[in-house]
Image (cartoon, helix red, strand yellow):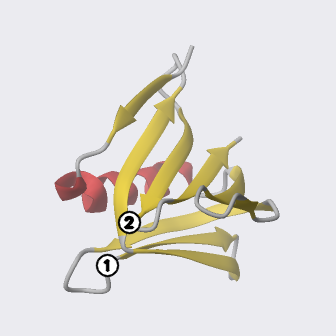
Amino acid sequence: MAITTQIPQDQWQDFLVKLSNGNRGRALSLETFDSASGDQSATRQGKLMAVDYDPIGKGNDIVVTTGVDEIDYSHTINAPVELWQAQHDSGEVGALEIIDQNGVKTILSLK
């Protein structure tokens, strides 16, 4: 059974650095859902390179980057307001859900 917890915004930077360092190279899928329009993006697949956070005043975004030796794909979430993690019973992070100020959800599933 997965445990889902919200990460407080003042902890995002440290949390995402640890997540990136501990999960670099893991396979992932990335999807976005716009609840207002009902739109869903195509699923992107890749290997995690990093998840970086620039706080308010320094960009106010989260960037998910995939690739191994060089960047294959980057996805930017502008003005994020919520960050959730789903953690397996083993303690391993299984997914992140990031919600932006417009209600668009980005789901990052780690495999």
Q: What separation in Å lies between label 2 and label 1 (alpha carbons)?
A: 7 Å
Q: How far across and down, in percent of the image, does residue 53 sit? A: 36, 70
Query: Which residue is farthest front?
Result: 36
Which residue is tagged 2? 80
Q: Residue at x 45, y 57 (%)?
A: 99
Image spot of residue 90 (x, y percent): 52, 19
- Which amino acid does the dot numbered 1 rest on? Asn
Q: Is residue 56 above or below residue 12?
A: below
Q: Residue furthest bottom?
A: 58
Residue at coordinates 66% horizontally, 70% vertically from top-left? Answer: 66
Label 2 close to label 1 by CB (< 8 Å): yes
Q: Residue at x 82, y 64 (%)?
A: 42
Q: Quadrant of residue 59?
A: bottom left
Which residue matches tag 1?
Answer: 60
Q: Position of residue 75 (x, y in %)?
A: 60, 75
Figure quadrant of the C terminus: top right
Residues packed near mark 2 inside 10 Å, few (<14), some (14 to 19) or many (20 plus): many
Q: Quadrant of residue 29?
A: bottom right
Instruction: Tell me the SS state at disc 1.
Output: loop
- On the rendered structure, is 40 left or right of 51? right
Q: Position of residue 3 (x, y in %)?
A: 46, 22
For this rendering, which residue is in front, 81 or 89? 81
Describe residue 37's horizontal placement relative to residue 45 as left or right.
Answer: left
100 left or right, relative to 25? left
| Quadrant assignment for the N terminus | top right
Q: Secondary structure at mark 2?
A: strand
From the viewer's side, name the closer residue of 40 and 23: 40
In this view, the residue in front, 39 or 107, is 39
The numbered mark, 2 or 1, whose residue comes first in the sequence reads 1
Q: Residue at x 25, y 86 (%)?
A: 58
Answer with the quarter of the image where residue 9 lies: bottom left
